[in-house]
């Protein structure tokens, strides 16, 4: 087994790569009235056009490049009602996008530059600010460019939240004191105790972090978080977000563009998955997928269609959502959502109302969605959070299948590569079941014991599922119909039929091209006529086709009110108490870090195995040490064993490691006592072998469309079956208009697998994001050929 040091190095590289790649309604409600201190008849809110504001400089020094510094400027864009009153505050936090002009003699944008010449990203949300002001909110979009591009006062900070919060706190103090720069109308005042946050990309990550901080302040009420294509703020080496702590219990909505070319893994779904497993949750959490939408088009200032970026997960043939539709969705949905949160009518929205089916569109735009109801309104029939549910459901009834298989998939963040779902990228990697059938008589049945059979307090049955498009039993290109059957103790049955569409995309060499999103189907129980809901005995799923497979994350009863008496969500988090010992008893120097890793036992190094890595500051401490290692139980499969490893990194480069991992959990049982021995290690880097072979490649432009200057070509020589590169990616830029492009790829013959089939993957980029040509067939090539010729095809924008 490889050492922990090599594992940490591998994870560190992954985190650096992820950081680099991820830079960055219902019908109208009545016009709202301003919040407290209103006149007898509150005035209607009349919108004002969004406008810039500048509050001057602060005492905070920021880096603007080449060793120069400036004082941080406070500025942004605002829209507000015109009529007198006290209004709630909506803050819109933009992401990290293009900021600095690119000099003529450079190819890439400078990381930092003077605030005078920066491209502002806050005006791109002017349309949203105006829509919010029209519904009775004072809406601000602060300029956050420097929070994403510079340390403050020379103190580097790996995370953005503290810098963003400093800017927000300074600006809100100016708003509180009536700074005239905001140009609010006479007697218009912001109620700073009621705050709503919208965040896009890194602004979404920051909005969540700020919301957590403000929620802990009794003087401030965070009324809702709306996150658009958000990133996840992940500590160093932490592979899976929310593995050690629950999500903040605030009204939450996350919007995911399915063709996100920036946050391609749709990591923001983790915020909702964390809410899903919280047995004490009191606020609803909403996830919405916008099919074909991209990362950028929420912001009017971003013009690049990133959906065809190499960092995304959408097939070129997948239909894209027009910019106007993506913008129109947000313009309609955000004010309606905030109004529902403000008036505490969230359960009246069609999207959330338990008594209504899940809508197929919101604001006229096709959507998929999933709602996590407050724990008191949920009764899980099959939560899919534990492998024990393969046999017994959370209510105590038997789980059985007929002519089918049922498999458990633990909560992971890796997506593609997970053992029970190796060819799909499922946003958030939720703990779930994989149900596959092989005949038209297949069935999944969950029995309800008599103590749980009275469902009269429930409003609907909610299923969260998606077809597995990679399963060979799946009929090609067809939607699947599943009969959902309720049976009572007298044997009477009632059913509803659910149609599940095949996910968009196609199967490539090693994965399904598009994200596979698990969306909700909500069936009002009033539609199941003829069964005694006071004595239900079972809930069954009957697929109508002769073969297929689906992912099932939730099968639960939900209520319109907090009246469900049986809450069977398991406690999500556990703790391992660990003692570390070793021969070195000297105190570790300042800034020494301890890493404790919990991983699946007996898994090959290249396969996903990580459950959690927890970090600890051990400055001035010495062995023996005692630490508690928290973990998320949904990341474990109770049928597997898990082991612990530890390492200590000292600032001078000295490293300590556990020579052998220690078995920590066997078949779901924690082994005690847990003692890890750490010893100093010496890392010897293996020399990089010199390539001993070359492959000459001639790349032909699409017919009638020659290569023009300034195009970027990415050429990868890879093993066709696994996608593993034989030669590192070669990046070249065209300098003239040509019909063909020639290059040589160097590789090591020792790396060529016997019997392996190899291919070339070529993509042509315009503006670094847009793929305009490629060879999508990955035809096998002969490594011994004198020359390999490839004909590229146009990728339609």
Image (cartoon, rainbow, N blue to C red):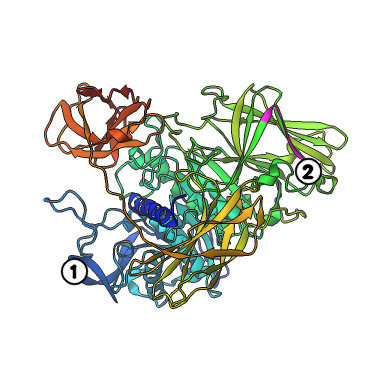
* Residue 715 spot, x, y in % from top left: 26, 34
What is the quadrant of residue 620 in the picture?
bottom left
Verify whether residue 399 appears in magenta. yes
Tag 2, which secondary structure?
loop
Q: Which residue is mark 2?
A: 397
Residue 80 in the image: x percent, y percent?
Answer: 41, 63
Q: As rendered, which of 625 and 551 lies closer to the eye?
A: 625
477 shown above or below 406? above
Tell me, yes or no, whether the highlighted magenta stretch contains residue 295: no
**Disc 2 packing (10 Å; few <14; some 14–19; many ≥20):** many
Left or right for 433, reference 646 = right
Q: Residue furthest right?
A: 490
Give how far across and how far down residue 675 sits, in percent. Answer: 57, 65
Res. 67 mark: 1
Magenta stretch: dominant SS? strand
- Of 544 and 734, the residue lying toward us: 734
Q: Which residues are magenta?
A: 398-404
Quadrant the C terminus occupies = top left
Res 589 visible? yes
């Amino acid at each position: 087994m490889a050492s922990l040091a090599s594992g940490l190095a591998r994870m560190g590289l992954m985190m650096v790569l992820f950081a680099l790649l991820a830079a960055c309604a219902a019908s109208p409600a009545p016009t709202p009235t301003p919040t407290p201190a209103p006149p007898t008849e509150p005035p209607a809110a009349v919108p004002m056009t969004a406008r810039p504001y500048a509050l001057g400089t602060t005492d905070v020094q920021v880096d603007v490049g080449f060793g120069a510094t400036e004082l941080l400027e406070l500025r942004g864009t605002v829209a507000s009602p015109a009529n007198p009153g006290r209004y709630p505050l909506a803050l819109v936090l933009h992401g990290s996008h293009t900021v600095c002009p690119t000099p003529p003699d450079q190819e890439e944008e400078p990381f930092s530059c003077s605030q005078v010449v920066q491209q502002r990203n806050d005006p791109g949300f002017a349309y949203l600010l105006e829509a919010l002001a029209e519904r009775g909110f004072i809406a601000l979009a602060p300029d956050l460019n420097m929070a994403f591009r510079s340390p403050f006062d020379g103190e580097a900070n790996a995370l953005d939240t503290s810098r963003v919060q400093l800017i927000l706190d300074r600006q809100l103090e100016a708003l509180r004191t009536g700074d005239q720069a905001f140009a609010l109308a006479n007697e218009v005042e912001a109620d700073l105790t009621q705050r709503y946050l919208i965040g896009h990309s890194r602004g979404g990550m920051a909005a969540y972090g700020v919301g957590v901080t403000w929620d802990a302040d009794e003087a401030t009420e965070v009324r809702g978080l709306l996150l658009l294509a958000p990133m996840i703020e992940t500590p160093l080496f932490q592979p899976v977000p929310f593995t050690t702590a629950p999500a903040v219990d605030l009204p939450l909505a996350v919007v995911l563009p399915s063709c996100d070319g920036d946050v391609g893994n749709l990591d923001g779904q983790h915020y909702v998955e964390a809410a899903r497993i919280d047995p004490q949750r009191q606020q609803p959490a909403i996830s919405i997928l916008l099919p074909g939408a991209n990362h950028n088009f929420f912001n009017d200032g971003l013009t690049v269609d990133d959906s065809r970026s190499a960092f995304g997960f959408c097939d070129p043939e997948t239909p894209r959502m027009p910019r106007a539709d993506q913008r129109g969705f947000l313009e309609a949905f955000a004010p309606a959502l905030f109004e529902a949160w403000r008036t505490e009518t969230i359960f009246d929205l069609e999207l959330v109302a338990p008594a209504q089916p899940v809508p197929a569109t919101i604001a006229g735009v096709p959507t998929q969605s999933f709602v996590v109801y407050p724990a008191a309104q949920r009764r899980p029939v099959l939560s899919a959070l534990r492998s024990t549910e393969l046999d017994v459901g959370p209510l105590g009834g038997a789980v059985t299948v007929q002519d089918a298989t049922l498999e458990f998939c633990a909560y992971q963040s890796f997506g593609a590569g997970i053992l029970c779902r190796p060819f799909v990228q499922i946003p958030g990697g939720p703990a779930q079941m994989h149900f596959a059938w092989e005949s038209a008589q297949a069935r999944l049945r969950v029995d309800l014991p008599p103590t749980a059979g009275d469902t009269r307090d429930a409003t609907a049955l909610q299923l969260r599922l998606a077809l597995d498009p990679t399963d060979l039993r799946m009929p090609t290109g067809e939607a699947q119909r599943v009969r959902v059957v309720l049976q009572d103790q007298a044997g009477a049955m009632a059913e509803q039929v659910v149609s599940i569409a095949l996910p968009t995309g196609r199967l490539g060499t090693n994965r399904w091209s598009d994200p596979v999103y698990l969306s909700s189907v909500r069936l009002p129980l009033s539609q199941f006529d003829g069964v005694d809901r006071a004595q239900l005995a079972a809930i069954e799923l009957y697929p109508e086709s002769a073969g297929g497979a689906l992912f099932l994350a939730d099968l639960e009863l939900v209520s319109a009110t907090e009246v469900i008496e049986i809450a069977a969500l398991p406690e999500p988090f556990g703790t391992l108490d660990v003692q570390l010992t070793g021969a070195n008893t000297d105190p570790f120097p300042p800034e020494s870090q301890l890493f404790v890793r919990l991983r699946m036992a007996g898994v090959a190094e290249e396969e996903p195995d990580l459950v959690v890595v927890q970090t600890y500051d051990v400055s001035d401490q010495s062995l023996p040490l005692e630490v508690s290692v928290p973990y998320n139980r949904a990341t474990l499969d109770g049928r597997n064993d898990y082991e612990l490893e530890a390492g200590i990194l000292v600032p001078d480069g000295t490293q300590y490691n556990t020579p052998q991992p220690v078995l920590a959990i066997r078949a779901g049982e924690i082994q005690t006592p847990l003692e890890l021995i750490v010893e100093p290690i010496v890392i010897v880097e293996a020399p990089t072998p010199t390539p001993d072979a070359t492959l000459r490649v001639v790349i032909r432009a699409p017919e009638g469309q020659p290569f023009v200057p300034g195009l970027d070509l990415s050429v990868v020589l890879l093993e066709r079956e696994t996608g593993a590169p034989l030669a590192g990616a070669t990046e070249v830029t065209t300098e003239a208009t040509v019909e063909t492009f020639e290059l040589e790829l160097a590789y090591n013959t020792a790396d060529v697998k016997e019997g392996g089939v190899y291919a070339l993957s070529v993509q042509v980029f315009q503006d670094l994001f847009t793929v305009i040509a490629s060879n999508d067939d990955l035809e096998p090539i002969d490594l011994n050929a004198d020359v390999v010729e490839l004909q590229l095809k146009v990728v339609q924008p």
